[in-house]
Amino acid sequence: MTHWPFVAAAYAIALVGTLALVAASYAAMRRAEKDVDALRNER
Amino acid sequence: MHAFANPARFLKLARPLTLWLGWLGALAVAGALLDGLLLAPRDYLQGDSVRIMYVHVPAAWLGMGGWAGLATASLMQLVWRHPIAAVAARAIAVPGAVFTAICLATGSLWGRPTWGTWWQWDGRMTSMLVLLFLYIGWIALAEAERERGGEGRVAAIFGLVGAVNLPVIHYSVLWWRSLHQGQSIGLTGTSIDGSMLWPLLGSAIGFTLLFAAIVLMRMRAALARQKVETRLRRMAA
């Protein structure tokens, strides 16, 4: 039994999960901080 | 810790730290995983499936470490009413749940070629699954409490009580007969050869730095949203 498909699947799950978390967190942070800047400029 | 009770002071440190932690973590993970895939030797018994260790172990460590951080933040919220503590606990919960899920999925993928089964209801695997359910329950509870305008004290108590599961996970391989291997790295030494230990440590450090960067980004987003909500409320009044 070759183990490489299991290794590849495990790495794919770990990397996709981590990258998705980084991307979602970065997008949420940028959006929220832009809203603060927009509100500050309105005053 | 009390110095960071002021969100402005916290943000002054968090802004540059997010960038540094993120890039250092990404570089460490890339280097360690390439080392683990291409340079580290196969195991004499497990063959190439041992390479799953370089993503499975850091995910397990972060799943458990995440709840330890959540419980610490809960304690700070309940005892000292630290204003950043509730924000930190909320920022930790989702990444902690995701890394626990990654640990369970990669463990299953490691178990199939090594033990001949995807899943076994033994102490280590079951207590790790319980940790995932605790995370999901905590996220639902914190969200429900926030919608009702609560301070998150019920979720904080749940965070502290849930920490009981952490020693159960850690000692499960000693307390019950298990397919899962015992502890390989202790405070006094390790049974892992250096050629496998270094990529494992590099991967664990890299994923931990990335986890910290993710938590800081989520905290910055939460603090910015709070600021907008407060200003809008003030403008409407």
Image: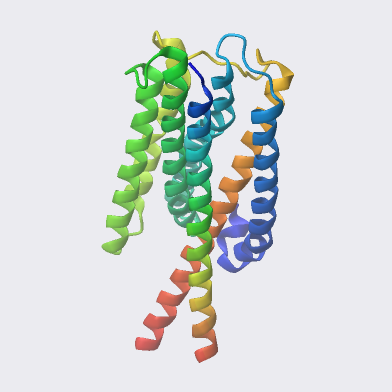
As rendered, which of A29 and B50 lies closer to the eye? B50
Front in this rendered view, residue B28 or B38:
B38
Q: Residue furthest front?
A: A1
Residue at 39%, 10% (x, y): give it. B176
Locate residue B162, reporting x and y percent.
37, 35
Where is residue B18? Give x, y as percent: 63, 57
**Image point 34% across, 49% down: which residue?**
B139
In the image, taking residue B169 as reference, residue B185 lies left or right, namely right
Horizontal side of residue A2 vs B24, given as left or right = left
- Count up the numbered dots: 0
In which quarter of the view is residue B116 placed? top left
**Any part of residue B65 in sight:** yes
Render colour scheme: rainbow
Please determine whether, in this image, residue B106 is positioned above or below residue B118: below
In the image, residue B108 sits, relative to residue B23, either above or below, namely: above
Query: Which residue is drawn at the image coordinates 46% and 55% (left, top)?
Result: B81
Question: Residue B129 in the image: x percent, y percent?
Answer: 35, 30
Residue A43 in view (yes/no): no
Image check: B98 left or right of A8? left
Measured as percent of width and height from the top left, residue B2 is found at 59, 55
**As drawn, which residue projects farthest toward the bottom?**
A43
Query: Image point 68% across, 22% down: which residue?
Result: B196
Q: Is residue B17 rendered to the left or right of residue B116?
A: right
